[in-house]
Amino acid sequence: MGEAVTLALQLVLSGDPDLLEIVLLSLRVSLTATVLACLIGLPIGSLVAIGRFPGRNAVLIVMNALMGLPPVVVGLLVYLHLSRSGPLGFLGLLYTPTAMIIAQTLLIAPIVAALSRQVLEDLHAEYSEQFRSLCLTRVQAVEALLWDARYSLLTVGLAGFGRAVAEVGAVIIVGGNIDHLTRVMTTAIALETSKGDLALALALGIILLVIALGVNAAVQSVRMTATRQAYV
């Protein structure tokens, strides 16, 4: 175990090209999926937060249920649509990073929508009378809520990114874990562990933990800076 940890640290510190390639692809796929999921989930969460319409409770139940969507089911659905016999097979996206981005986006968009809905609904309850007095339209109210809750929504985006970067099941189904093409940190960790190459698996695990800590520290720093500025 000690030897494996030592080799892992050597791989990280030496900038191993294979390791760097896997890490960069992981970040590209997960960050792109997070941005797309926020573009989809935040408007949906906003509209449900301030809207009052028939069937709203059913929508809330579905939104909350989709937060626990099984990754392998999402991977299977995306695979069926992107396979050669599927409706989108002509695009040739299966076993590409794009397919992995699609799968991760579908996984984390419901998380972003549900969490942002809760944040914005609580905020809307506080500002609803003020919005009515100003005669704001629904779009203007949504814009105001999104701006006022921007730092809380950073945490929502962080939750989505954490879910994406740690994903294994869906990405391995639609990506195939192909070396130098679709191999990301989580699928590489699973593969190298099964092969007994604990050094590379541990190196990837260390980097994954460092990335998670770094992103959390960055978001926390932004929120603390904003809080200090608010009191100035």
Image (cartoon, rainbow, N blue to C red):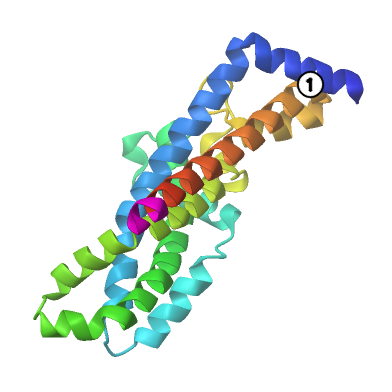
Q: Residue 212 in the image: state x and y as whole percent.
A: 59, 40
Query: From where the camera sits, is residue 138 visible?
Result: yes
Query: Does the magenta portion include 13?
Result: no
| Residue that protrudes farthest toward the left in the picture | 135
Return the x and y of residue 107 as percentages of the image width and height: 48, 55
* View extreme (front): residue: 232
Along the viewing direction, whichever of 97 and 165 lies nearer the viewer = 165
Q: Secondary structure at mark 1?
A: helix
Which quarter of the rendered picture does the C terminus lie within?
bottom left
Q: Image check: 127 left or right of 225?
A: left
Magenta segment's dominant SS is helix
Amino acid marked by disc 1 = Ala
- Residue stretch rendered in magenta on the structure: 227-232
Left or right: residue 48 versus residue 202 is left
Report if residue 228 lies within the magenta region.
yes
Identify the residue shown where x is 52% and y is 73%.
Answer: 65
Query: Which one is nearer the viewer's eye here, 199 or 78?
Result: 199
The correct choice, above or below, for 12 with respect to 207 in the image is: above
